[in-house]
Image: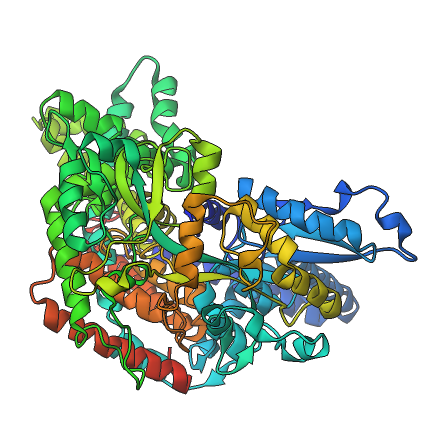
Amino acid sequence: MRRGLTATLATCALALVVAACGGGGSKSSSTSAASSTPGASTAAAGPATKLTLWVGWSDRELDVFKKVVSEYDAAHPEVTIDLVGGIDDDKITAALRSGDGPDAVSSFTSSNVGAYCSSGGWIDLAPYMKQDGIDANIFPSTAQYYTQYNGTRCALPLLADAYGFYVNKDLLAKAGITSPPKTITELTEDAKKLTTRKADGSLDVVGFDPFFGFFQNTPTTYAPLFGAQWQDANGKSTLATDPSWTKLLTWQKDLIDYYGYDNLVKWQAGVGDEFSASNAFETGKLAMNLDGEWRVAFIQAEHPTLQYTSAPLPVDDAKPDLYGTGYINGTIIGIPKGSKHPDLAWALVKYLTTDDKALAELSNGLRNVPSTTSSAKSPDLIPDANFSTFIDIFNNPKSSTNPITAAGSGYTDLFTSFLANWQAGKVKDLQSGLAGVDKSIDAQKEQAEAGQAP
Amino acid sequence: MRVERPKRPLTAARTGARTSGLRSLGRREAVKPARRASQRRADWRRRGLVLFLMSPWIVGFTVFFAYPILDTAYLSFFHYDLLSPPRFIGLDNYRFLLHDDPRVWPAIKNTLWLIAVMVPARVVFALGIALMLARIRSGAGVARTIFYLPALVPPVAATLGFVYLLNPATGPVNKGLGVLGISGPNWFQSPEWAKPSLALLGMWAVGNVMVIFLAAVLDVPRQLYEAAEIDGAGTVQRFWHVTVPAISPVILFAVVIGVIEALQYFTQAYVAGHIAAGQASQAGSVSTTEVGYPLGSTLFYPILLYDAAFRRFTMGYASALTMVLLVVAFAVTYVIVRRSRALIYQEGTQS
């Protein structure tokens, strides 16, 4: 999911020149957390066992993670931990295949859990949990859902993500808007009020950009705004039959057309990279934005003076009860089948996923949602009004994640490529187009479940 | 100019001479058995030496060519996700490729665009530069170096540079056009302009082909031009009737190499698509960006193949895609080489 990011992509693309991408995890970014605690390992009877842990975080976020891991390292002389950041799912799969992977691995892409569990690529954690008396119910129910597939629990949640709404207070005040919009109608009106153009007609400040593919704008993060459902009780895709999708897409396209598709594309090309200090919301080029809770920490680190506030996402006028909900998912962690020290790896995984103090510390640094029910109330959490919005969204019983299927995230891929055409105005008949996507999704799922081609 | 296949009689004669020489050598050995043994040892030694000298090629061919191709052909009949063991599914991968995969046909169309537009554009541009450089008298070395330099830039770096230059909002190209009062296109961000942008990049980095053209152009005998001039041929006529026939084998070479490169076109399109789509990240999905951004306009066949293999982990299906590409590449090259024999002027033949 999130932050597969340009940085990773660029690295990936560069790596292609040297060797096939995904042809093995590059250890160049490897950072040993072990050396930071001199004296810790001297207490050990024998030489410490080296445990390799792969995570997706990089740069500032990796430093935060490294700190927590090094505390564990210091307290456990039997291991030294080699922490490798910037890992994506291509690398994880390549490592699983070669059998020469890390001892423990985490992924931002919770919807791949279907593939990892059903293939046995990540080992079943149930025996370990039983042995240590860990009950899966210490995790919120959504987090339980996206860490298992068909009853096999091969992963545990390691921090979670909730998607909400960010507004630039200064820009809103200048436009005479007193509070963040609560409905789609208000959102649309405010977006238009906040938008300014340059002398040559090109966009300068955009009120709200609903373009799919921009920042965190995807059908998965937008579905909760309209309460749109992915599938029915039988698991059949419902893009055409659930009218919420049509409503969502019609509104989204209308707003894009207000800016002009080409104008918006041009503006997007000109604003900075999402995960950099020149992020459009942080620089005031985008007045309102849908984003994950981590943005709180990015703003704190990159633009501490930015006057902003977070809020739940505006929702369909006809469904006001949706206000306060949002899309949620999370980072998952597990033990690959090639792990050389699964017992030691389990101890580390257990610590990272269930220790409230560790989770609180990670949450304070990364501003990710702590992923056990008790850690969400931990006194160690540094309170922050903008961040607590997201804890509330995460704990809202109506907040939802997207379905986990045997085809992994294949269905969102199919829908996304249809939406790219839709927002460009290349789809003449939305209803029959959606019906076509439904058909493809159902066929793909059937194939994946039967294990057929491709 | 209709030409015959050249040199065959000559080559045949030469080979014939060599064989008969060997045969007569053998006959002589029959007469003197003592020398035959030592001769045989020498033969074996020579064969050993040949094998030894060839061994890098043999190893390279087997390990990096024959084995991968055979393994790919084998895997194309399996469902293989890289995690669980491959499972035999017969022709299902090929059936899906030909009937069901909605991305195959757009990928083929995009690749055909490269062959129809980018390859000719590159050949014409390289030839044009070569002709220009061949005329430069003073500072020829410097000029040649300057025009060759882009070919030395790694493709990824060159692509990053072009995406920056052609950024619709902040790129110098559109800013320059803006000064002239022209509103530039969205280049890599526009489905209509993404492929032409890649073609521009391809033309900029055409140095390798250009150098070969330059050598060929400089190699055209001067007396042919002089003779043509005496006959009253103008610049255009001299180009069409002297230069082009004389360098036609090199043009064929450039086209064949260009077509093969087009069939394998990957790095530039992949990098450009991802960087241009920069901000796109896909929540809850493996793919952080839509492949072939924007709107599938840079989804070339090898990108589809890579996506199937290393992003969707359908290795069996990717193998089937590879086999089809291999067959097509062979066929296209064969057809070009066959058909173009008639078009190529070869020395020592009558026209």
Task: Determine the image quadrant of residue B308.
Answer: bottom left
Q: In which quarter of the image is residue B53?
A: bottom right
Q: Can residue A215 be seen in this view?
A: no
Q: In the image shown, does A111 or A94 lie closer to the viewer?
A: A111
Residue that appears at 69% across and 61% down? A348
Q: Can residue B228 be seen in this view?
A: yes
Report the coloring of the rendering: rainbow
The x, y position of residue A137, in whole percent, is: 56, 74
Q: How many labels does the image show?
A: 0
Residue A429 vs residue B269, the one in the foreground: A429
Q: Which residue lies furthest to the right in this view?
A: A45
Q: Position of residue B200 (x, y in %)?
A: 25, 38
Q: Position of residue B39 (x, y in %)?
A: 73, 63
Q: Which of A338 and A122 is in front in this view?
A: A122
Q: Point out residue A316 in the picture as x, y percentages from the top left corner.
A: 19, 60
User: B96 left or right of A343?
Assistant: left
- The answer to whether residue A261 is above or below residue B292 is above
Q: Is residue B236 above or below residue A31?
A: above
- Residue A6 in the figure: left or right of residue B1: right
Between A248 and A104, the residue placed more toward the observer is A248
Residue at 24% x, 42% y is A179
